[in-house]
Image (cartoon, helix red, strand yellow):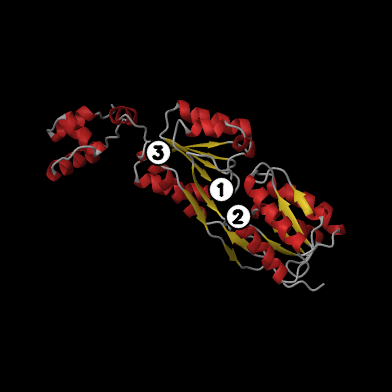
Amino acid sequence: MKTTIVDVAKKAKVSIATVSRVINGNYPVKEATREKVLAVIRSLKYVPNMQAREFNRQKSTIVGVVVPSIYNMFFAEVMNGVEEHFTNESYSLMLCCSKNDSKLEMRCINDFMARNVSGIIVVSPHTENLQNTFYERIARQIPLVFINSYEKHPNISYVSNDQDAGARLAINYLLEHKHRDILFIRGEHSDSYDIKEQAYVDIMKRRHYFHEKHMINIGDGNSNETVDNTMQKVLEILPSSEATAVFACNDLMAAGVVNACKKLNIAIPEELSIVGYDNIALSRFIEPKLTTVEQNMFLLGSQAAQLLLEKINSDNQSSKRIMLENSLVERESVGVCSR
């Protein structure tokens, strides 16, 4: 039979209210009494009823998180930062995957609202939902934080990497290694890809190296098909291309380029140099190990959690923007152009 708060109170010889105060930490309790109650809770293996606890506090202890994919390790590492921060604050997480679909993303948000979560974090929100009034309406109703979004809306807190600076770091690194013909590989429906593309176009046009044919969109950039889709696109392009380098908007796409090179017997970095973006664990596991841009994934998550807590505790009255710096992680996939 399930242990109840009444059982704990009887064995500890205290009132139910005292047990509740120890569990919730919302009223002072003598240290000796608190230790006694906690010892009984441990001995009886009592698990508090979260619904009752939330009803008494008149506040949910659940936070909703929306990610566009579970296949890209980037999102898993961001979630690690979110989860660790909220665990220390006694909040639980509810995760929803939008599959890079704008309508499904809206449904995730509305489901969270219906479940009365305390706040919502959205990682890389879909561009369609950013450009309509959906999030403006939601932000007036519930604390909302975006990770890696660059469309600014009032009453939403943001934590992002400076992806313009990160893209320029990667492209200039290739230029420093004497590469002039650089393929740019991106996905769709994310303003982070748009920002990287703008940086690429700006730099390459100023240097008079820009060619429209060097820009490749592989579709969904975070699915379980991203690596293979990128590989297929690159297999079609590389045999007739003069490109000596590739800048990919994430490490999954970069891995697809590596696989294409293996099939075509193109040596990396002797014949083709590759720079990815994110620095997910995969970038260290493939051969050659991938040169990439560090995205501070754990920090993105923990900072977003902190911003959401501030909004929750201020009754949704505070909003902040945090921009994190990028760094280049040099490994084995870039060499000096010999052409």
Residue 19, located in which quarter of the rendered image?
top left
Task: Please name the residue shown 14% across and 35% down the image.
Answer: 12
Between marks 3 and 2 in the image, the one whose residue lies nearer the viewer:
3
Q: Tell me where residue 146 appears, x and y as whole percent.
A: 52, 43
Q: CA distance from mark 2 to mark 1?
A: 9 Å
Q: Amino acid at mark 1?
A: Asn
Label 3, on which residue?
A: 317
Secondary element type, mark 2: helix
Expressed as whole percent of the image width and height from the top left, the position of residue 37 reads: 18, 39
Residue linked to disc 2: 163
Q: Is residue 122 visible?
A: yes
Q: Earlier in the sequence, mark 3 or mark 2?
A: 2
Q: Secondary structure at mark 3?
A: loop
User: Residues under labels 3 and 1: Cα distance?
Assistant: 21 Å
Reading the image, the residue beneath label 1 is 148
Identify which residue is drawn at 76% across, 58% down.
Answer: 183
* Amino acid type at image mark 3: Gln
Q: Nearer the viewer, residue 99 or 142?
A: 142
Tell me whether the residue at label 3 lies in contact with that at label 2, contact meaning CB atoms closer than 8 angstroms. no
Q: Where's residue 33, x and y in %? A: 13, 41
